[in-house]
């Protein structure tokens, strides 16, 4: 009985170690307010919709992430015109503070 209790206690405490070490979120802390996080999500969604509707960009799988109004673009396109178009559409989106264009051009 004592061995079973020790095993159960060890298993229970092992499951809590993530909570003690990383705060339960793997160490990631989102310091944005709810309104800023919501605004960032709306910006990301608006840009993705623009990309999907754009004949130059719709064929590419581009990543869009927004953090406090700064947009990060990633992915691979077939030319500089598409890369520049993605940045142009992102910059023209309401709420965007800055755009980091990390889209690569296929060679």
Image: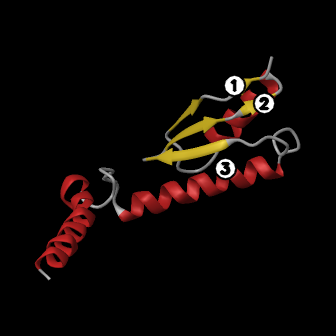
Q: Where residue 21 sits: x, y (%)?
A: 21, 53
Residue toward you, 6 or 100: 6
Q: Earlier in the sequence, mark 1 or mark 3?
A: 3
Q: Earlier in the sequence, mark 2 or mark 3?
A: 3
Residue toward you, 78 or 28: 28
Q: CA distance from mark 1 to mark 2?
A: 6 Å
Q: CA distance from mark 1 to mark 3?
A: 18 Å
Identify the residue under disc 2: 77
Mark 3 surroundings within 10 Å by alpha-carbon count, few (fewer than 14), some (14 through 19), many (20 or more)? many
Q: Where residue 85 sits: x, y (%)?
A: 76, 33
Label 1 secondary element: strand
Mark 2 surroundings within 10 Å by alpha-carbon count, few (fewer than 14), some (14 through 19), many (20 or more)? many
Q: Where residue 83 sits: x, y (%)?
A: 73, 29
Looking at the image, is 7 positioned above or below residue 60? Answer: below
Q: Are marks 1 and 3 in contact (CB under 8 Å)?
A: no
Looking at the image, is 7 positioned above or below residue 45? Answer: below
Identify the residue under disc 3: 47
**Mark carried by residue 104:** 1
Residue that appears at 80% across and 40% down: 60
**Mark carried by residue 22:** none
Residue toward you, 4 or 25: 4
Q: Where residue 77 sits: x, y (%)?
A: 78, 30
Looking at the image, is 73 positioned above or below residue 29? Answer: above
Pick out the residue farthest to the top. Answer: 107
Mark 1 surroundings within 10 Å by alpha-carbon count, few (fewer than 14), some (14 through 19), many (20 or more)? some
Q: Are marks 1 and 2 in contact (CB under 8 Å)?
A: yes
Looking at the image, is 83 positioned above or below residue 2? Answer: above
Q: Quadrant of residue 57?
A: top right
In the picture, measured across the screen, residue 92 lies left or right of residue 65, that is right
Q: Are marks 2 and 3 in contact (CB under 8 Å)?
A: no
In the picture, measured across the screen, residue 87 lies left or right of residue 10, that is right
Question: In which quadrant of the rendered image does the C terminus lie?
Answer: top right
């Amino acid at each position: 009985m004592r061995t079973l209790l020790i095993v159960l206690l060890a298993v229970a405490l092992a499951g809590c170690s993530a909570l003690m070490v990383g705060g339960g979120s793997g160490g990631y802390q989102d310091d944005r307010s709810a309104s800023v996080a919501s605004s960032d999500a709306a910006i990301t969604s608006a840009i993705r919709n623009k990309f999907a509707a754009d004949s130059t960009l719709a064929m590419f799988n581009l990543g869009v992430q927004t953090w406090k109004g700064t947009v990060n673009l990633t992915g691979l396109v077939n030319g500089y015109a598409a890369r520049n178009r993605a940045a142009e559409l992102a910059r023209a989106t309401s709420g965007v503070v800055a755009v980091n264009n990390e889209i690569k051009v296929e060679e």
